Image: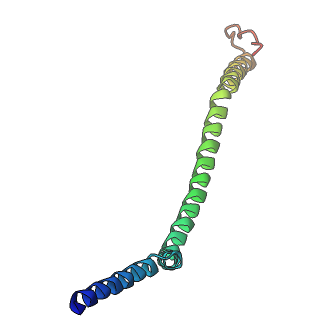
Amino acid sequence: MEEPEMQLKGKKVTDKFTESVYVLANEPSVALYRLQEHVRRSLPELAQHKADMQRWEEQSQGAVYTVEYACSAVKNLVDSSIYFRSVEGLLKQAISIRDHMNATAQGHSPEEPPPPSSA
C-alpha cells in the first residue's frame, strides 16, 4: 500500500513544483523584465525613425513655404497685368507723339496725333 501512496505524494510534489515554476515564469517582475528587454532592443530604431520623421517634416515645411511664396509671386504678377497694359498704352502714345513731333520738325503735314488717353 505504500507504493500507491508514494506515487500520489510524488505526483502532488511534482504538481506543486510545476505550478510554482509556472507562477515564477509569469510573475509580473518577469513580465516587466521582458518588457524592458524589448524596449532596450527596439528603442534605438524608434529614436532613429523619430529623428528621420522630424527631418522630413522640416524639409516638407520648407518646401511648402517655397510653393506658397511662388504661388503668391505668380498671383501678384497676374494682378499687375493691368499696370503692364497701362504702361504699354502710354508707350504707344509716346511713340505716336514722338513720330508726330519728328514729322512736324521736318515740315511734313503728319496725321493728327491721337488724343492723350487717361489710362
Q: Assign the N terminus to one quadrant of the image.
A: bottom left
Report the front residue among 62 and 79. Answer: 62
Q: Residue at x 22, y 91 (%)?
A: 3
| Residue 99 vertical placement versus 68 (above, below) | above
Horizontal relation, residue 77 to residue 10: left or right:
right
Report the front residue among 75 and 77. Answer: 75
Q: Residue at x 67, y 23 (%)?
A: 82
Indicate the quadrant where residue 116 lies. top right
Image x and y of residue 107, in percent? 72, 15
Q: Residue at x 51, y 69 (%)?
A: 46
How many callouts does the rendering have? 0
Image x and y of residue 56, in percent? 54, 60
Q: Pick out the residue farthest to the front.
A: 1
Image x and y of residue 77, in percent? 64, 33
Horizontal relation, residue 68 to residue 52: left or right:
right
Q: Residue at x 59, y 48 (%)?
A: 64
Indicate the quadrant where residue 13 lies. bottom left
